[in-house]
């Protein structure tokens, strides 16, 4: 079904609420999945809330507005960010990497002249679609390990300092004092990765090609970034570290990490599926870690943001304020952002770089617009949870988006299949709605998260 | 009304009849809106908009 057809169906369906048991002692949720509208009602009043009463009447008045807003978010965005892979190489051989091993071990760097020409072309593209906005497009240097091609990356950051807001996602092992000074002095956002609270756990999935531990190097980098305003650490949750997630957030909080992600392992390539935790185990460990971040906030007054969960809260409280664009359908790949591989190929997202059929052409010879319209990008851009089961009949499908299309295609057999962690996402939404019921949602979001937003619906009675 | 969506959550909501004389918990429903500009993905995140400028 096309986007236009979906909008037509949405507009003609009218408001309709369905009940959702969120596991709360007092509250149940009612949602309209078509617009991502929700309300929390006394469990003894669910039936009357479904068909009438103040909540339904107020929502009916706003239905068209919310339908248009969600449609615009899902189908009308223009890209404002690029994930740049300046090299195919990585000095680590992580179990679950989504990039092919032969590239990471023996691949090529993107030469500086090519990187410069690429950024110039990207600058012009973003200027054409973002207009005169004061906001800069984002350019994120990304994996494999971008600092394997450090000289080119740093030269490019200086050459295009006025044109992009830059970020670097690195494994942290090459982040020496000079690199930290360079990046922090230029306000480059820095992301690291660490999978365990101690070396023995990190080493289970993240080691060098020779099998050496890198745990202590990442801890050293974290210590040097303490106090910097814009950095984060990703933990990829897998069977090896799942029992240690609570200790992970304790470590991160003690290290004054502003933001972390406790991501489910992406199961795009077979190696990752070997360390995929079961949904129920993932939920239990993840919620225990979230509970611990709340306790630490209560004890110290300092928050540790778990960004992937915060984004679920945002999807509920303010759908357009999402920062992550994985948990929405279609996802952000090829819509909000795209990826540039080290060989100049364009992909909807870095997750697809190992899957050549998703190559939408070459940046320098074909251009971005051609890639966005290509047959390679289309299955990702058009993946719509309204159009396939079980998502099409799911009450929370637009809080979740059934990530990730690469997983759905490679692990589950097609773009019209669910992602790898369906039940875990349902439990996250339930957990988020329970926090809202208990008045705790803001404790899991950064201070000022709603600056620049407008309250468009508010019933508390 | 043509909506055919069914709940997919782990258990059906309890919809017991209201008890006489018992006050219902207040209904909660909010929504905020802004211009969308998120570009994060699971391999990278920058949550705070201000930090991106």
Image: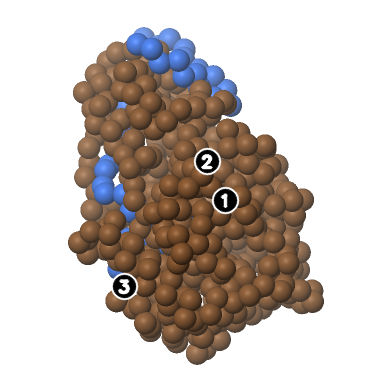
- Residue contact at pointers 3 and 2, CB within 8 angstroms: no
Question: Where residue A379 is drawn, which disc sits there?
Answer: 2
The blue-tinted chain is B
Counting labels gives 3
In this view, the residue in front, A110 or A270, is A110
Above or below for A414 versus A51: below
Q: Which residue is mark 3?
A: A163
- Residue contact at pointers 1 and 2, CB within 8 angstroms: yes
- Percent x, y for residue A172? 58, 76
SS assignment at label 1: helix
Above or below for A160 versus A41: below
Q: Chain of mark 1?
A: A
Q: Work out how far the residue at label 3 is from the one at label 2, CA to CA, in angstroms.
A: 31 Å
Q: Work out how far the residue at label 1 is from the one at label 2, CA to CA, in angstroms.
A: 9 Å
Q: Chain of mark 3?
A: A
Above or below for A255 versus A405: below
Q: Which residue is mark 1?
A: A358
């Amino acid at each position: 079904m096309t986007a236009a057809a979906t909008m037509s169906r949405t507009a003609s369906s009218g408001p309709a609420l369905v009940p959702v048991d969120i596991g709360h002692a007092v509250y149940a949720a009612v949602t309209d999945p078509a617009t991502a509208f929700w309300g929390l009602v006394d469990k003894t009043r669910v039936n009357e809330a479904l068909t009438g009463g103040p909540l339904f009447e107020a929502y009916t008045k706003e239905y068209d507005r919310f339908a248009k807003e969600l449609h615009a978010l899902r189908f009308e965005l223009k890209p404002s960010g690029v994930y740049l892979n300046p090299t195919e190489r990585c000095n680590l051989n992580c179990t679950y990497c989504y990039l092919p091993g032969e590239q990471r071990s023996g691949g090529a760097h993107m030469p500086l002249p090519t990187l410069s020409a690429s950024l110039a072309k990207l600058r012009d593209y973003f200027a054409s679609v973002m207009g005169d906005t004061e906001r800069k497009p984002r350019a994120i240097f990304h994996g494999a390990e971008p600092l394997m091609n450090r000289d080119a990356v740093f030269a490019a950051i200086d050459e295009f300092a006025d044109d992009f807001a830059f970020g670097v996602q690195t494994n942290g092992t090459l982040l020496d004092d000079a690199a930290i000074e360079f990046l922090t002095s230029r306000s480059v956002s820095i992301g690291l990765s660490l999978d365990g609270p101690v070396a023995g756990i990190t080493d289970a999935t993240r080691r060098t090609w020779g099998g050496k531990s890198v745990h202590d190097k990442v801890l050293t980098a974290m210590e040097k970034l303490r106090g910097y305003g814009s950095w984060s650490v990703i933990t990829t949750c897998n069977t090896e570290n799942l029992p240690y997630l609570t200790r992970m957030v304790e470590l991160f909080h003690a290290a004054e990490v502003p933001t972390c992600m406790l991501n489910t392992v992406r199961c795009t390539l077979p190696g990752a599926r070997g360390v995929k935790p079961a949904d129920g185990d993932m939920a239990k460990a993840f919620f225990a870690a979230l509970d611990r971040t709340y306790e630490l906030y209560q004890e110290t007054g300092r928050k540790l943001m778990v960004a992937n969960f915060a984004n679920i809260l945002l999807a509920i409280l303010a759908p357009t304020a999402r920062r992550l664009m994985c948990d929405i359908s279609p996802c952000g790949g090829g819509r909000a952002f795209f990826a540039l591989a080290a060989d100049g190929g364009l992909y909807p997202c870095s997750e697809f770089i190992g899957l050549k059929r998703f190559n939408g052409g070459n940046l320098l010879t074909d251009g971005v617009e051609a890639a966005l319209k290509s047959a390679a990008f289309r299955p990702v851009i058009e993946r719509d949870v309204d159009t396939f089961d079980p998502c099409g009949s799911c009450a929370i499908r637009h809080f979740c988006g059934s990530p990730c299309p690469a997983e759905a295609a490679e692990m589950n057999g097609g773009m019209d299949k669910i992602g790898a962690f369906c039940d875990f996402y349902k439990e996250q939404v339930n957990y988020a709605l329970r926090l809202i019921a208990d008045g705790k949602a803001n404790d899991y979001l950064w201070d000022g998260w709603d600056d620049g937003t407008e309250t468009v619906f508010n019933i508390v009675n | 009304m043509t909506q055919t969506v069914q709940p997919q959550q782990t258990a059906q909501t309890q919809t017991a009849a209201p008890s006489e004389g018992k006050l219902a918990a207040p209904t909660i429903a909010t929504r905020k809106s802004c211009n969308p500009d998120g570009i994060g993905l699971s391999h990278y995140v920058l949550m705070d908009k201000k930090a991106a400028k």
